[in-house]
Amino acid sequence: MQETRHQYREALKQLEHQTLDGLDLVIQQLDRALEAISYQDVELAGIVVADDDRIDGRYLEVHQAVLSLLARQTPVAGDLRIVAALLHTIRCVERMGDQCVNIAKLVPLSGYEAPKDKDILDSIERMGQLARSQVSQAKHAFATRNTALAQDLVRQDAEINRLNREIFKRAVEVGDDLDMREWAMFMILVARCLERVGDNTVDIAEQVVFVVTGLFREFADISVPTTPTTS
Amino acid sequence: MNPHEVSSKESTHMPTADGPQEQTDVAPDVSALGVREGRGHTVSLEDLHAYYGQQHAIKGIDLDFVANRVTAIIGPSGCGKSTMVRCINRMHEEIPGARAEGSVKLDDLDVYAPEVDVTAVRRLIGMVFQKPNPFPTMSVFDNVAAGIRLSGNSRGANLRDRVHGALRAVGLWDEVKSRLNQPGIGLSGGQQQRLCIARTVAVEPEVILMDEPCSALDPVATLKIEELIDELKERYTIVIVTHNMQQAARVADSTVFMLDGEVIEVGPTNDIFTKPRDERTERYVTGKFG
Amino acid sequence: MSITTLPQISAKRRRTDKVMRGSLVAGTVIALIPLILIIFYLLQKGLSTWSRSFFTTDPTGSFFGNPGGIRSAILGSLEIVALATIISIPIGIGVALYLTEYGKQSWFANTVRYFVDVMTGVPSIMFGLFIYIVLVTAHVGGVGFAAWKGAIALALLMLPIVVRSAEVVLLVVPSSLREAALALGAPRWRVVFRVVLPTAASGLVTGSLLAVARGMGETAPLLFTVSTAFGLTFNLSHQMNTMPFLIYNYIQSPRAVIQGLAWGAALTLVVIVLILNIIARAIAGRSRMT
């Protein structure tokens, strides 16, 4: 049967690419921000902050494209769910971008000769890697509509949350050195930003399940079993 | 007695300004039809088959229409939606060579039972057609009264009250009260269709069938009729055939998707348009075919 | 691709246009000439005989003396045609109603249509002969020639015309009106009498008037059924004078005066037919306005 609404399908595909490519931008920013933290590279941090404009721009583009599609093409059923999910997802992208900026802004504040605690730094690095892989997995899950992959993100996110609590505990016990304590507090903030990035990927995972099944389920922490809410 | 005298009690609605064609615009007031007792009526189709000569157009449909709800029937051209609806009030058999089998139940009464009087069925199940068809030789008043007179119930009936009530119920009263004895075909397309609806409603049916009632109308007239449908469902069970999916989405509580003489999916309109269960329904509503 | 000038009509095409137009105009003129000549002759020869006594006195039948007027012929024609109309119009419309509303395309209805078509082609003298054999020679009703027998012959002649034109008019009534009436719960006979006939009314009247005009002018059926009389009579069981018969008789007379009367009668007949046609047209025109 001949495919109808060719332009509309193209517009929908284009919208999805734009949104998911935003996740690539986030990964890029995340890498840079983490490097800036590790090496205390103020210049790199400045680049991260400036480059957030790209992500904000992407958000506006997608938002406008969604409005246009809704107004002109009246998507329904599966298409409507995709459009709603993409709108939600690009907000997550924008928020993740903001978290990267927050991380980058913490760089100059931590000082040039700040003493570092190896354990905390390792944990931060580990969290960063996890966050990065979660974003990548979220993108893949959405693109392939893979609900199993989406569900798995909850498990990974639990790990990030655990690391976050660990860093906090470690920072409390870090010692009497004033500079050290100050640095450790900043690291807590960085950890929190990374934890938020993780939460956003779980949001995206929920959207993937919504697109595929039409049901919206909040993925709680897997350690706390909940009953799913059906619409 | 002059049946066209305007009643002295005026409508208490405040008229709202409207477009250039129609003067005052009053909301439809279904309570003008008087008090109705009893609950609403359901329609059930059981193993319905319909034929045009040898052609098997409706292939075994089982369907329930909920009382006092609007159910829309959607599907591509030629899927049998109009045919099925015409089987409900037994208009299908008026076509030479056409016949229907199975049962159509109004509550518990099978309209296809052997001894049933077809005209009685049609008085209980009214129909509004695609192209407005007021009777050209009759005035506005006579058009609305036509249903009552043609079905032979005009003796003793308070015709004037019923006609005025019907016109109020469809929101046409203010627009025509000063020209009740002018030809019905002098009205605009949207008004004519509302006149036809008033004519149907004056007979006091239980169910109203609508076969693409807005396809011949402009967008403003269409929206007025959709609003009217929303009001009418308080009193009647409404089935509407439409090829305009957005209209089904706006107006209907439940939607039925048909293809090639069969029902593919039935469900709340919200579900059909946000998460249809059948692949074919999904493809049709997203415009992949049809 | 740009257009710098629009191409002009070639000289050859201009010539062809002129030739075509010229020959069509010429053809029309040639066709109109006999008609104009007829009217001219009628006026020239007939108008002079019109006088008060022409219309108010009966033919005397005297060979030598005052021939009288043509009153009995005019009244006789009107009487016989009126009776023929009363017979043929209700039956004709009835047959047309059967064909459009009930029979439709059944083999029986098609057979009836075929025979009606055949009847329109039957020479009018056949109707006269038929009635002559069946009613006149058998002296049905106790007499030989009689006015009512002539009326029947004319009715047979008018019948297929009425049926044909009525069927056409009834088919023009949109089926959506019938559907609307049926869907309101009207039995079929009410649909026919309350909706179809009123809508078709003016067309039916027009068709009937044309049949009447035809009936007024037919001579052959009257020759064998009514014969003639000179005096005025209103008794349908007797022979009666008619215009065609009078013209037929008088034109053969050696007396110029009587021939003149024939022309006068011919002119009168044409005027009556013309008036009927104008009335028919006026009714058709007025119905188109509404």
Image (spheres, rainbow, N blue to C red):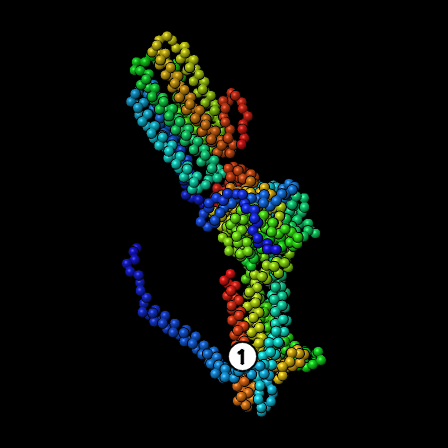
Q: Quadrant of residue C136?
A: bottom right
B211, C79: nearer the viewer: C79
Image-based side of B206 in relation to C284, left or right: right
The residue depicted at 66 percent of the width and 78 percent of the height is C236
Left or right of residue C187: residue A145: left
The residue closer to the viewer here, C56 or B290, is C56
Number of marks drawn: 1
**Is residue C199 visible in the rendered structure shown here?**
yes
Amino acid beneath label 1:
Thr
Above or below, B82 against C273 in this view is above
**Identity of the residue drawn at 66% across and 53% down:** B156
Q: Residue furthest bottom?
A: C64
Note whether C85 is above or below B37 in the view shown.
Answer: below
Identify the residue position indicated by label 1 in the image: C268
Residue C221 visible in the displayed image: no
The quadrant of the image that shows the N terminus of chain B is bottom right
Residue at x-position 38% and y-position 19%: A190
How many C-alpha atoms fall within 10 Å of the one at disc 1: few (<14), some, or many (≥20)? many
Residue A191 placement, left or right of B70: left
Q: Nearer the viewer, residue C141 or A78?
A: C141
Q: Residue furthest left?
A: C4
Location of residue B133 with respect to C77 vertically, above or below: above
User: Mark 1 — on which chain does it sit?
Assistant: C
Q: Residue C43: where, in percent of width, then height? A: 48, 81
Q: Position of residue B250 (x, y in %)?
A: 51, 41
Q: Is residue B41 above or below residue B216?
A: above
Question: Residue C147: where, in percent of width, then height?
Answer: 64, 78
Residue at 34% across / 22% down in the picture?
A: A104
